[in-house]
Image (tube, rainbow, N blue to C red):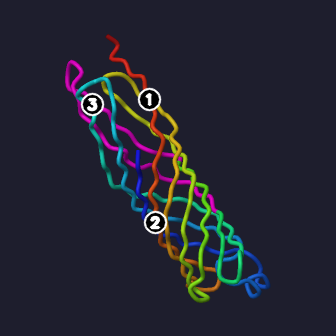
Amino acid sequence: TKTTLIAAALLISTGTTFAQSTQPNFVGPAIGLTVSAIQNKVDYESTVPSINGQNTQTNDSEAALIASYGFALSPDWVGTVGISYSVKSTDAGKVNYTAGTAQSFSGSFKDHLTISFAPGYRVGPNALVYGKLAYHQLKADFTDTASSAGTNTHTGTGVGFGVAFAIGPKIELRAEYESVAYSSQKIQLTTGA
């Protein structure tokens, strides 16, 4: 499974007025919401010839809660650690196949958890460009009309880049691109025959 994320995040920095006045932008704790356009691509391998080699590609959106902490690595460099949790499931697609009669296999992704590190370089006092490395975990719900339904967990690594703007005191707007490659899972299915 490969997922491409294009996200926009609105982060609200927290802290005291004193801390804000003495710390530059992008440093300190923040909470917020991300809204992402997602493209999921799932490749299928199976001993059932009509499934083997098929793939699905779906476009969907995701909303996630995010908490992060930025710390100064030097006057121009900032490191940000973050964690996010998706509050919306996304479509994983549907594959039609033949196993005696016409059947289908469909799925969705949910409970998407991300832990990330993003080193960034200040481009002036109100802008930051950054790279991102992230650990991803999500659950995949699936239904197969020839057998049953189930859930399994996939983990993956994401690599991306982005830009952040301080649009006001304690308010950041971020835009980023990330590509995530997830682990594969074997699902033992039976037609009951």
Asked if the residue at tag 3 contacts the one at tag 1, i.e. Cβ–Cβ closer than 8 Å, the answer is: no
Three-letter amino acid code at the position of disc 3: Ile
| Disc 2 target residue | 7
| Disc 1 target residue | 186
Residue 35 in picture, x, y percent from top left: 47, 64
Badge number at residue 51: 3
Q: Of residues 64 and 98, which is closer to you in this image?
A: 98
In the shown orientation, is residue 66 left or right of residue 2? right
Q: In this view, does 60 lie above or below 185?
A: below
In the shown orientation, is residue 50 left or right of residue 86? left
Image quarter of residue 24: bottom right
In the shown orientation, is residue 21 left or right of residue 181? right
Q: Residue furthest right?
A: 18
**What is the secondary structure assignment of the residue under circle 3?**
loop
Report the Cα–Cα distance between label 1 and label 2. 30 Å
Residue at position x 64%, y 63% in the image: 67
Report the Cα–Cα distance between label 1 and label 3. 14 Å
Q: In which quarter of the image is the C terminus?
A: top left
Q: Is residue 189 above or below residue 140?
A: above
